[in-house]
Amino acid sequence: MQNFDYQTPTRLIFGENVIEKLPGVMAAIGRKVLLTYGGGSIKKIGLYDKVKELLKDFEITELPGIQPNPRYDPSVLDGVRLCKENRIEVILSVGGGSVLDCSKAIAAGACYDGDPWDLISYKVKAKSALPVVDIITLAATGSEYDSGGVISRTETNDKIGYIDPLLFPVCSFLDPRYTFTVSRKQTAAGCADAMNHILEQYFCEDATLMNDGFCESGLKSLMINGKACLENPEDYRARAEMMFACTLACNGILSLGNSDSGWPMHGIEHALSGYYDITHGEGLAIITPRWMRHILSERTLGRFVKYGVNVFGIDASLPEEEIADKAIDATYAFFESIGIPMHLRQLGIDESRIDEMARHIAVNEGLENAYVPLSEQDIKEILIASL
Ligand code: NZQ
Ligand code: ZN
């Protein structure tokens, strides 16, 4: 078991109507608020009006229009400028992971005099950040309980996971009812994203029995509840458990004491959505079974056997190679069963930029240190197998 140093300062407020507590939470932090949101979903579900009503005594500046795969330019830069111009004291992010990730980058940029890209690209370490409160409306990333934000810079095809303990939200509000309207596509992608967060922690060199149990039940919960959400989008129980599982999946708590896997599938996917602006969870679902096949070997076989038996209930008396094979097939079949297109070509990605992406990933993602080290050639093979 590995050493660890763990602290999550985020307060989680979970359940129906919990945003009634919003004014009290916000008042303790600040009165000058930057309200950040995306392309309008929060207006359609009545959440925008509700927030405005709850915060009628606050001074609110708005940053709308934050896109999926949030952009450094204009969103982060506009947000930083608004914070500085209006002496913002707290950022309130209302929306999915993209809005929250962008808000975290703004929070750090607002307390820095130079170009915020210095922080996101790890050239400079932030000394402070504005507090961020969020109302999360999409179960997927776990950004509401972690210290990361993923920011895209289109002109360089960069998509960087910016991680710093300063970026933990102060408080996250999770009302599963606000996820009833999430589309089939985004529900499935969110399920795949959270499952992948768990798989990135499960497939590692040194894991404990306890963490394996957390991860295996997290995966089962996501598969069962993800399907139930698709069958009945207003199934409160299913939406609630999916939201809870997604929140826990990316915070690191499921793998405390495990060795770090290097998160190879995320390293590969971030380039795909950096280059092609695809939906993160879909990219991951496509990469996952191909990465699994690529790394399956005598060394990794035991992990696949455990995964196959404990997560998919595959007969433990079968030969180990057969269990591993069935486990990878079952992973593929699950993603396909929730409607995810399972080939990159279906997302408009062909072989034309594979070499360039493989190089970009090899140079920027450090996957030579992953659980199973990946060279540029390995990455290229995984991408080609995913076409
Ligand atoms: O923009 P609006 O109108 O709000 O619509 C959004 C968007 O079009 C819509 N949506 C959100 N809540 C909704 C809703 N539609 C109907 N009803 C609701 N309640 O869904 C679309 C996608 O939203 P987005 O925020 O992009 O999705 P998600 O939460 O999956 O976030 C994806 C981003 O997070 C990054 C990904 O790379 C990607 O950029 N990640 C962040 C992580 C983190 N912070 O820890 C970890 C992840 O691995 C991931 O990389
Ligand atoms: Zn992810």
Image (cartoon, rainbow, N blue to C red):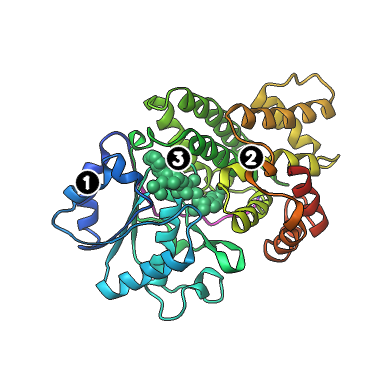
The amino acid type found where label 1 is placed reads Asp
Q: Are marks 2 and 1 in contact (CB under 8 Å)?
A: no
The residue to which callout 1 is attached is 49
Secondary structure mostly seen in magenta is loop
Residue visible at 56% across and 71% down in the picture: 122
The amino acid type found where label 2 is placed reads Ala
* Quadrant of the image occupied by residue 93: bottom left
Distance from disc 1 to disc 3, alpha carbons, whole Å, reads 21 Å
Give the numbered dot on residue 139.
Answer: 3
Q: Is residue 5 magenta?
A: yes
Residue visible at 63% across and 58% down in the picture: 275
- What's the magenta region? 2-13
Badge 3, how many Cα within 10 Å: few under 14, some, many 20+?
A: many
The residue to which callout 2 is attached is 285
Which sits earlier in the primary sequence, circle 3 or circle 2?
3
Locate residue 26, reporting x and y percent: 24, 55
